[in-house]
Amino acid sequence: MPEITLIEGLLQAMDEEMARDDSVFITGEDVGPRGGVFRATMGLYEKYGADRVIDAPLAELSIIAVGIGAALVGMRPICEIQFADYIFPAFNQIVNEAALTYYRSNGDWHVPLVIRAPYGGGIGGGPYHSQSVEAFFAHAPGLKIVIPSTPYDAKGLLKSAVRDPNPVMIFEPKKGYRLIRGEVPDDEEVLVPIGPANVTRQGSDLTVYAYGMMHYYTLQAAAMVAEQDGIECEVVDLRTLVPLDKDTVIDSFKKTGKALIVYEDNRFLGYGAEIAAILSDEAFEYMDGPIRRLAGPDNVPGMPYAHPMQEYFMLNPDKIAAAIRELAGY
Amino acid sequence: MATGVQIVHQTGDLDDAGLDLDNKTLLEMYWQMVRARRTDERAWMLHRQGKIAFHVSCIGQEAIQVGAAYAMRRGHDYAHLYYRDLAFAFGLDYTPAEFFLGVFSKAGEPSSGARQMPAHYSSYQRGMLPASSPVGTQVPQAAGVALACKLRGEDRVTVVTLGEGATSEGDFYEGLNWAGIHKLPLVCLVENNIYAISVPMSLQMPVPNVADRAPMFGIKGVIVDGNDVLASYRVMSEAIERARSGGGTTLVEAKTYRPTPHSSDDDDRTYRTREEVELWKQRDPILRFEAYLRARGLLDDAAITELEARVRQEVDDAQAAAIAAPDPAPEDALFPIFKE
């Protein structure tokens, strides 16, 4: 089975879906001959032409809104926002328009739209090329949100997103675009359903919940504490943030009684806060220690440019391992 | 400020040479305008009686709306309307019965299942794209609809409407930018009624006409007297034909006026004089069209009496049916947010 990078998984997904379905097209800044600033769409312009890989004007609002309009009448647009940090001009179109259309039209209209956006820090991007924005969108009803942490899931989730009749946002851990590698079969269709979380390591001492780049680091941290401290972590890769796989989240907590939720966004009201709330509400009897969140610091933006400050903000396997040890001590 | 294209001049002069509307259609358009006016007036009355919670009016703008609807290939072209487009919606086969289900927010309301405020038009069958409340958002969406039609090689045209206030939103510029770049089969119709709630044109934009902005998008801009239904029909027909034949997008500005407050929650006495409103009432689009039809021998007092009685009966029946209809079940609030 060939080993590929996470961004190659995304490219393969788009290539296959465009070949399968004529209604799939891509738009975004620099997605055409340039192949995207991260090369996620490399070669697709040459293969599918200017009508299906459309370089958009530098205007995020209309990259999304044009996608919404095309989706309303049966196209399957994949809209790329170059960095998640720049998605906010399109916030209204996403949360007020795409997200609500099916509900507010009484099911008459739907918006099969995919929004791709690289997110996250650790790449020397400063405050406007490093943000994690998933919590804003997870709060708004009507958006499916997926964050892959492996090449297999990146490919399989993006292909499922293209086929989904609803707006799906896929936030891609850009630090992991080429860092994260994994085996993906080339002789069978790879589809990962939107919804189910994935228990990626079995353990009994505590559960670590994570997604995206933090899941990648969490597996490293779990291996570290198992070897050095004999602590056996269960690791849950959430993969789909909305709709959340509550059963898998709660079942693991019932097994271990302790939860550490790792996310790189600011801690206050971040996505992990909801996981913590669900566990304390729905699995209180199983609680065997504080429900902990390990996240970016509060009250400062993610993240500063200079390397020492960036590393201070950014989580890493060592910081996660330290938090695991502390929680395991309860 | 330009007056725009006219056919039925305020002076009574007529410029209807070459007009391609038969007598039956002319009378049907008149009926649509009267039907929208009486429906709208009834909603105001019901609001003043405390029987409905909210109404947003199309009064005064029936000419441009009916003219535009009749210029479309109805059931084939797409329309992305805004909340003031009752007469436009009627022109696309929406009915008073549906409208009253909306203002009474009853079960079975077709646009949204009564989940949205009234006058947020949406109909999949009729190609009426789903309207929301934030103004201007429909413009770049309509560009996307037109892009899809162009990519698929369809000959459908998309008509998107908005008020002049919404042209201040970034959505308007971004949408028309796409339309210009890709020469999209789109008509952007701005119903310029001079006020965005209370804010007048002069504080909304530094140019005297919305259509003056067309060159910045590389598209054609046209101004029409929006109170002249025949001129509106002609200008919209030309714009739609241009879009259908590959000539790209037109920005049509219809000069009109809203003689009512913005909505049932507004009081327009706080921002404009009664004299100004009275002046515009003399330019009423229905009176203009009536004068034309009388001059052409198509309408007389007896015909008007008959038509008014017919419209009144339809409005009465629609209102009664809506009152008799059940409320939505409370748990209809839980309609799925995702399509299966």
Image: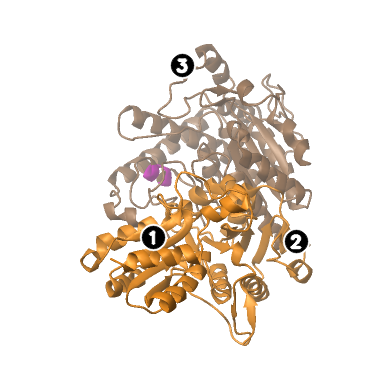
Cα separation, mark 1 vs mark 3, equals: 43 Å
- Which residue was labeled with disc 1? B336
Residue at the spot x=36%, y=53% of the render? B108
Residue extending farthest to the front is A228
> Would you call the spot at circle 3 few (<14 residues within 10 Å), some (14-19), or many (20 or more)?
few
Q: Give x and y (percent) for residue B170.
A: 63, 39
Q: Which numbered disc covers residue A32?
A: 2
Q: Can residue B39 be seen in this view?
A: yes
Q: Quadrant of residue A153?
A: bottom right
Question: What is the three-letter code of the residue carrying label 3?
Answer: Arg
Locate residue B202 relative to residue B95 in the image: left or right.
right
Q: Give x and y (percent) for residue A259.
A: 34, 66
Q: Earlier in the sequence, mark 1 or mark 3?
A: 3
- Which residue was labeled with disc 3? B269
Residue at the spot x=57%, y=63% of the render? A173
Of residue B44 and residue B314, the one placed in the foreground of this image is: B44
